[in-house]
């Protein structure tokens, strides 16, 4: 049966609060609904572990691997590679196993709890072990965390596709919230202390917070019986009962290509955010960088919220138009290089204006990222016919998420090389 959550036709009583048109429901109203809040919180839980490890990277490089060691120098790139590659491979594996989606949500969250408890123990006992052992242990835990996140995301997007587009948006908004909070905290910390120095107690708090978010997500998911609506397909089901990739690609090609393109382009953001320095604003560079990260994440959050506006949900805003929208985001790249050129100049006129324009550019880059991603995921269930197709689409779309992030991370190295080469010439 085709999902019609946003037409005037009636739905079952369980979802009656979402039978009206989207324009009648503000974001504040929706987050008061227990089911919507559950999807939102699980969305936070999807990105929180990665942000936690990212936030602790400076601690590991400085306090654990002692800055100048080989392990410190390769930590960040190794963490990124291990995370993206393991996530991509596992998503491909999951997509071929079209069953047990509801259980995957909880299993992934449980593994996140285990990973971060072990990370906490490893942090406390770091003096007991050699640096190679700690490095390998952390990379293994990063891989497990990425696999756990992929498992939860695979399951929750399958569930969201069946429940309706608004719940896909809830997951997307939750991920954006998980991006905003750490960047805001880092920006605030930059005014009171050196953000490169982090205490063991602070890192342990990071890890315990991640475990707590996962625990709360499991409780909400179980209490609200979110997975009860899914089609029950046994693990040993015949291949004929599975939805082929070709069916999904035929119906979703423009949406998944939008997701892929958006993430490839977006991965240049950290490169420019960490290399373009302040010129006129009354901020130190140590404050300007987390400020820009905060601005980008706020734009990302706003873009995901407004994705539910009627004009973007309209059938006239077709998947092909979403794909064109994602391609147009490439125009941001030369603009960033323009500001990088300004950054390398010794004298610039109106430096504060340039800082403000650059800040606006980062906000719009974040906004369009969240906007395209949310619209794409929200239109997935509308493009499919049966619940079986909608459930299996969770794994199919996640392949393009992981592939986009992987290719984007590789291309970001090229951006770093171009920026450094340009700086040497000028």
Image (tube, rainbow, N blue to C red):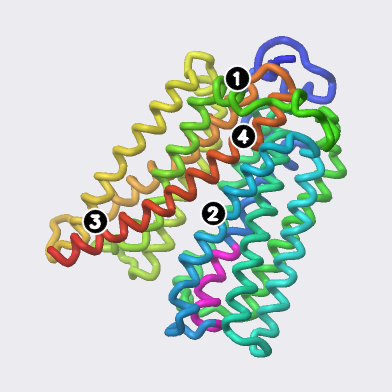
As helix, strand or loop, the secondary structure at mark 4 comes to helix
**Mark 4 or mark 1, whichever is nearer to me:** 4
Q: Which mark is residue 383?
A: 1
Q: Residue at x 24, y 51 (%)?
A: 337
The reply to whether dot 2 and dot 4 touch (C-beta < 8 Å) is no
Marker disc for residue 396: 4
The quadrant the N terminus occupies is top right
Numbered disc in front, either 3 or 2: 2
Q: Residue at x 54, y 37 (%)?
A: 304
Dominant secondary-structure state across the stretch colored magenta: helix
The reply to whether discs 3 and 2 touch (Cβ–Cβ < 8 Å) is: no
Is label 1 or label 3 in front?
A: 1
Query: Left or right of 206: which side holds 333?
Result: left
Give 388 or 362, whichever is nearer the viewer.
388
Q: Which residue is mark 2?
A: 84
Q: Is residue 69 above or below residue 296?
A: below
**Residue in front for this viewpoint, 342 or 349:** 342
Task: Tell me, for residue 340, which label it has, or none.
Answer: 3
Q: Tell me the residue at 71%/47% (across/down).
A: 152
Label located before the other in sequence (2 or 4) = 2
**How far across and down, in percent of the image, does residue 191 sit?**
45, 72
Query: What distance separates the C-alpha of mark 2 from that of mark 4?
Result: 16 Å
| Residue 53 included in the magenta stretch of the image | yes
Q: Which sits earlier in the primary sequence, circle 3 or circle 2?
A: 2
Work out whether mark 2 precedes mark 1 in sequence or the reverse, and give the earlier one: 2
Q: Which mark is residue 182?
A: none
Measure how far apart labels 2 and 1 are at the Cα level.
28 Å
- Tell me which segment is drawn in magenta: 52-64
Disc 4/disc 1 C-alpha distance (Å): 14 Å
Regarding residue 71, the answer to whether it shows in the image is yes
Q: 223 or 22, which is in the foreground?
A: 223
């Amino acid at each position: 049966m085709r999902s019609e959550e946003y037409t005037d036709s009636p739905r079952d009583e369980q979802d009656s609060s979402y039978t009206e048109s989207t324009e009648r429901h503000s974001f504040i109203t929706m987050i008061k609904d227990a089911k919507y809040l559950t999807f939102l919180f699980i969305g936070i839980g999807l990105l929180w572990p990665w942000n936690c490890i990212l936030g602790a990277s400076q601690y590991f490089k400085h306090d654990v691997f002692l800055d100048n060691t080989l392990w410190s120098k390769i930590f960040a790139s190794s963490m990124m590679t291990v995370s993206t590659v393991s996530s991509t491979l596992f998503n491909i594996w999951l997509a071929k196993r079209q069953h047990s989606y509801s259980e995957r949500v909880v299993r992934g969250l449980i593994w996140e709890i285990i990973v971060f408890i072990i990370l906490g123990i490893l942090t406390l006992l770091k003096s007991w072990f050699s640096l190679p052992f700690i490095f390998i242990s952390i990379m293994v835990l990063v891989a497990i965390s990425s696999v756990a996140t992929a498992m939860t995301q695979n399951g929750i997007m399958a569930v969201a596709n069946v429940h309706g587009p608004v719940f896909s948006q809830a997951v997307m908004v939750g991920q954006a919230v998980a991006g905003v909070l750490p960047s805001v905290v880092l920006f605030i910390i930059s005014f009171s202390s050196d953000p490169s120095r982090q205490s063991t107690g602070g890192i342990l708090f990071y890890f315990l917070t991640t475990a707590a978010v996962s625990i709360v997500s499991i409780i909400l998911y179980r209490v609200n019986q979110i997975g009860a609506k899914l089609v029950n397909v046994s693990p040993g089901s015949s291949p004929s009962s599975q939805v082929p990739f070709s069916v999904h690609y035929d119906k979703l090609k423009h949406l998944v290509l939008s997701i892929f393109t958006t993430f490839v382009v977006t991965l240049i953001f950290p490169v420019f955010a960490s290399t373009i320095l302040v010129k006129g604003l009354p901020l130190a560079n140590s404050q300007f960088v987390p400020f820009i990260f905060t601005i980008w994440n706020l734009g990302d959050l706003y873009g995901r919220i407004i994705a539910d506006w009627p004009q973007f949900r309209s059938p006239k805003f077709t998947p092909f138009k979403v794909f064109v929208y994602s391609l147009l985001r490439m125009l941001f790249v030369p603009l960033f290089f323009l500001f990088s050129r300004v950054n390398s100049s010794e004298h610039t006129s109106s430096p504060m204006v340039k800082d403000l324009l650059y800040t606006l550019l980062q906000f719009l880059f974040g906004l369009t990222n969240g906007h395209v991603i949310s619209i794409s995921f929200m239109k997935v269930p509308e493009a499919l016919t049966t619940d079986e197709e909608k459930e299996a689409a969770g794994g199919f779309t996640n392949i393009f998420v992981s592939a986009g992030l992987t290719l984007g991370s590789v291309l970001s190295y090229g951006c770093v090389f171009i920026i450094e080469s340009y700086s040497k010439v000028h």
